[in-house]
Structure formats: C-alpha cells, structure tokens
Image (cartoon, rainbow, N blue to C red):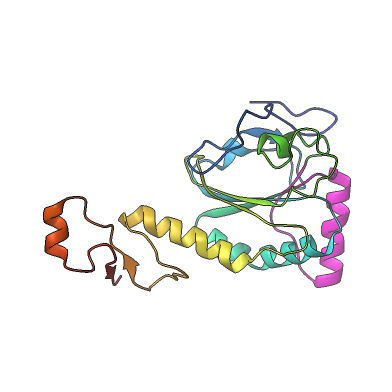
Amino acid sequence: MSAETDSGPAAAPPSACPPIIGDAAPNFRARTTMGARTLSSYRGRWLVFFSHPADFTPVCTSEFVAFARADEAFRALDCDLLALSVDSLPSHLAWQQSIAQSFGVRVPFPIVEDPAMGIARAYGMLPAGATSTATVRTTFVIDPEGIVRAVIAYPLTVGRSVAEILRLVRALQASDAADISTPEGWQPGEPVLVNPPTTSDEVGACGADWYYRLEGV
C-alpha cells in the first residue's frame, strides 16, 4: 500500500491494464475532506467510487448535489460514496462550501484530492502522457471484498444518472443474494431472470423459453 505524502495522495504505479470487472480495486491512501482515507478501509461494505476532472465545474456540481441527496439511500444498502477530483484539498473544501451555500446541500461523503493524478492513473482514467484530465469521469462499483463489479465512464458534457447507479448497486446485491440475473431496467420487487439450464435434459424440461425465464420475487 502506498503512503500519503506532503504533496498529496499517492497510489501504486499504474499497471499494464486498468482495473476491469472482476479485478481487485487498486488500494491507495490519500487526504480527503474528511481526513485520510484508504480504499481498504471500505472492506466489508459496498463502495461507489466516482471521479471528476476538476472542481467548480457545472456538470460535476450537479452530480455532487444528486449524490448528496441520495446518500441515505446508498447507506441503506450498506454502500458508501467516495468522490475524487484531481484538484487540491483546499479547492475541494471551497467547492463543497459553495455547494452548501448555492444549493442548501451538505456533501456528506469524502472527496479525495489527487493533484499528482496518481490515483487516476492507477485506475486507468488517464492514459500515459495525457495533457488533459477530461477522462477522469469514471464510476467504479466495488463490492465488500474489494472487487470491481461495474465500471461506467461519462464524457465531460453528460451528467451521470445517480438513480441508475443506485439501481445498479441494488441489482448487483440481488444477483449475489439469489444467484439470478436482472432484466433491463429492473427495480427491486420486479421479476428476475432464472439462470438458464446447462444440460440438454434441463433444456427439454424447461420448454421453448428455456433461455429466458422470469421468476417473481
């Protein structure tokens, strides 16, 4: 695990391949608006780790407001929120104060500083030699074992759907709990997809729709 330095957060050097679904999320220790944090300290809980290319940007501000308002809904799922921006800690503190003054919303989750962009690179959000931080717009859903379960990247001009990220966490938890899959747009309480059979005999017993079977919950 890397250590925090006076110049800001540090992370392990970027690997040959950025983390993808099924990989262990790279650990780091960094300064945040709520004190020092390590990624490993979130073990045992779900985590939505989302990044931003700069503070005081309009699209990112709208996302912070939405995430702040949904914080309790994520916590009800044993899921924490952790934000990252490449700007410094003083800038983060000023940004969250501005959000509180302008929108009446307190940011209840930590914002990681990454001025050296070591964490962004460790997570594959910045290609080698990049001259812009525009690609630091990725959301990682990490499970209680520290494994990346979903990765979603957004361009600078398109805001994330916090409702969809919340739905994604619920769907992942439902799939883990019952060994099922969820159809398009699934919401809690709706029918789920039974995993398809794996032998010819099982296929014959299921009928024509053997590969697509909905089951109530």
Left or right of 89 in this view: 65: left
Left or right of 47 in this view: 44: left
Identity of the residue drawn at 56% across and 61% down: 74
Rendering coords of residue 28 (x, y %) = 66, 33
Magenta stretch containing residue 89, yes or no? Answer: yes
Asked if 120 appears above or below 98 in the picture, the reply is above
Asked if 106 appears above or below 85 in the picture, the reply is below
Rendering coords of residue 8 (x, y %) = 81, 34
Question: How many marks do you count on the picture?
Answer: 0
Rendering coords of residue 96 (x, y %) = 82, 58
Q: Residue 157's image quarter?
A: bottom right
Q: Is 62 in front, or is 6? A: 62
Identity of the residue drawn at 72% across and 39% down: 120
- State which region is magenta: 84-113
Identity of the residue drawn at 85% across and 30% down: 7
Q: Residue 118's image quarter?
A: top right
Q: Quadrant of the C terminus?
A: bottom left
